[in-house]
Image: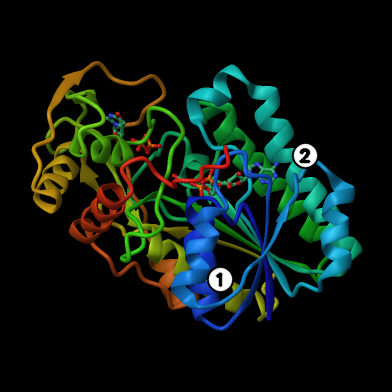
């Protein structure tokens, strides 16, 4: 089986390529390297002893994409390519809609032209907006006006685009995977998250404080109605997430039409709990101060992952301590990220 991975040199994509190769799949990657380095894939090849065909192509270039499909025959696509910075999306909504929505439509058109019928799509728990109740099941409402930024709205729009596309083409199969908070790194410490500039997300920020690149963490809000007043999230180890994609491919081979799964652990941890787990894993003290709430943040968000368990046989196996230990190994072995960043 030959899988095309769009956005495959990025954070989640590179970990998924590794799991696919280990599971015996042939892997090709399309990425424009706007937020990643090809070095990640060189390391995946080294770790697995297997080759990856790489195409530096932008999803906004339909003829470039078509050429890739002319050269190779794919059995399925895992689609990670997209822009993901929430704050940036507020300032550049058209760039985000163009890249994420038009890029995905271009991909679907090329797949359809070449008879590739199965796609796994990176969605996000952000499509749930402000949760009415917790834990979140897949049937919880997804109201576009409760989503606080263009990035999140692009994900929900794309869920509808893919559903409508499948409805018009009943032979096609779509897995919408709603990720909770992916963190950590491969246990080798060779690949991991390499954010541009100052990180927006908690774990990369905490690890850069631990490694001495940032002076202190600002905790956004200490007055939420949560166990200790700080925000609660469902952090999931990126390797568990990657394995979820391999299992979703198996599910698509059963011709299910459209399926939607939460990929989370079901456990909610507060910011202070994460800080303390990271201190334990790294042996470093994380300096922090509690400041005001961040605009658009919610108090708590965690998954009910039982559907993925019953239908995919998938369960997140790695806990918070392992997420922090592996994240720390990557950060301390690569304090400045990938050496040949192509960005
Ligand atoms: P990432 O930025 O590391 O990877 C995305 C990759 O897509 C990058 O390598 C980038 O160069 C590539 N890309 C972007 N636009 C492209 C285009 N037009 N053509 C070709 N390549 C393009 O991000 P990630 O964290 O690995 O996220 C992967 C996917 O998962 C994204 O769609 C993201 O929105 C989604 N997601 C991520 C998170 C998270 O917290 N990391 C949570 C939920 C959903
Ligand atoms: N957070 C924080 N300081 C930071 C980054 C994040 O206190 O520098 C908090 C944030 O308010 C939320 C949690 O950490 O409660 C997770 O935030 P992240 O941006 O990683 O994920 P998301 O908000 O998208 O779930």
Is mark 1 in CB contact (under 8 Å) with mark 2?
Answer: no
Q: Is residue 309 left or right of residue 271?
A: right
Image-quadrant location for residue 61: top right
Left or right side of 56 for 170: right
Instruction: Look at mark 2 in the image and give the residue it sits on.
Output: 102
Q: Which residue is at a point 21% across and 33% down the rendered structure image? A: 209
Q: Nearer the viewer, residue 215 or 242?
A: 215
Q: Which residue is mark 1?
A: 248
Q: Position of residue 67 (x, y in %)?
A: 88, 58
Can you say which quadrant of the picture contains the N terminus?
Answer: bottom right
Residue appearing at x 49%, y 24% in the figure? 87
Q: Is residue 61 above or below residue 251?
A: above
Q: At which x and y percent is residue 180? A: 41, 50
Residue 261 at least partly seen:
no
Q: Residue 169: where, in percent of width, then height?
A: 84, 64
Q: Is 185 placed left or right of 12 in the picture?
A: left
């Amino acid at each position: 089986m030959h899988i095309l991975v769009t956005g495959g040199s990025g954070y989640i994509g590179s970990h998924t390529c590794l799991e696919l190769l280990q599971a015996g799949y042939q892997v090709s990657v399309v990425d424009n390297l706007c937020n990643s380095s090809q070095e990640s894939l060189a390391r995946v090849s080294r770790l697995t002893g297997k080759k990856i065909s790489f195409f530096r192509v932008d999803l906004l270039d339909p003829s470039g994409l078509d050429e890739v499909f002319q050269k190779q025959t794919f059995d399925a696509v895992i689609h990670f390519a997209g822009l993901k910075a929430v704050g940036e999306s507020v300032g550049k909504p058209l760039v985000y809609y163009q890249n994420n929505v038009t890029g995905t439509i271009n991909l679907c058109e090329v797949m359809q032209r070449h008879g590739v019928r199965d796609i796994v799509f990176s969605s996000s728990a952000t499509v749930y907006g402000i949760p009415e109740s917790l834990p979140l099941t897949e049937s919880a409402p997804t109201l576009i006006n409760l989503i606080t930024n263009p990035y999140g709205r692009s994900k929900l729009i794309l869920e509808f685009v893919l559903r409508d596309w499948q409805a018009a083409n009943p032979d096609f199969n779509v897995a919408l995977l709603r990720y909770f908070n992916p963190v950590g790194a491969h246990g080798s410490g060779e690949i991991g998250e390499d954010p541009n500039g100052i990180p927006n997300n908690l774990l990369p920020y905490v690890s850069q404080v631990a490694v001495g690149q940032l002076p202190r963490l600002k905790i956004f809000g200490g007055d939420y109605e949560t166990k200790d007043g700080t925000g609660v999230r469902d952090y999931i180890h990126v390797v568990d997430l990657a394995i979820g994609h391999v299992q979703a491919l198996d599910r698509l081979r059963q011709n299910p039409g459209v399926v939607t799964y939460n990929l989370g652990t079901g456990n909610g941890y507060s910011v202070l709990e994460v800080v303390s787990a990271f201190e334990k894993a790294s042996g470093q003290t994380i300096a922090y101060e509690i400041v005001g709430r961040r605009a658009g943040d919610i108090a708590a968000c965690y998954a009910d992952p039982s559907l993925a368990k019953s239908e995919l046989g998938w369960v997140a196996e790695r806990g918070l301590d392992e997420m922090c230990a592996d994240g720390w190994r990557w950060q301390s072995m690569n304090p400045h990220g990938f050496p040949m960043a192509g960005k």
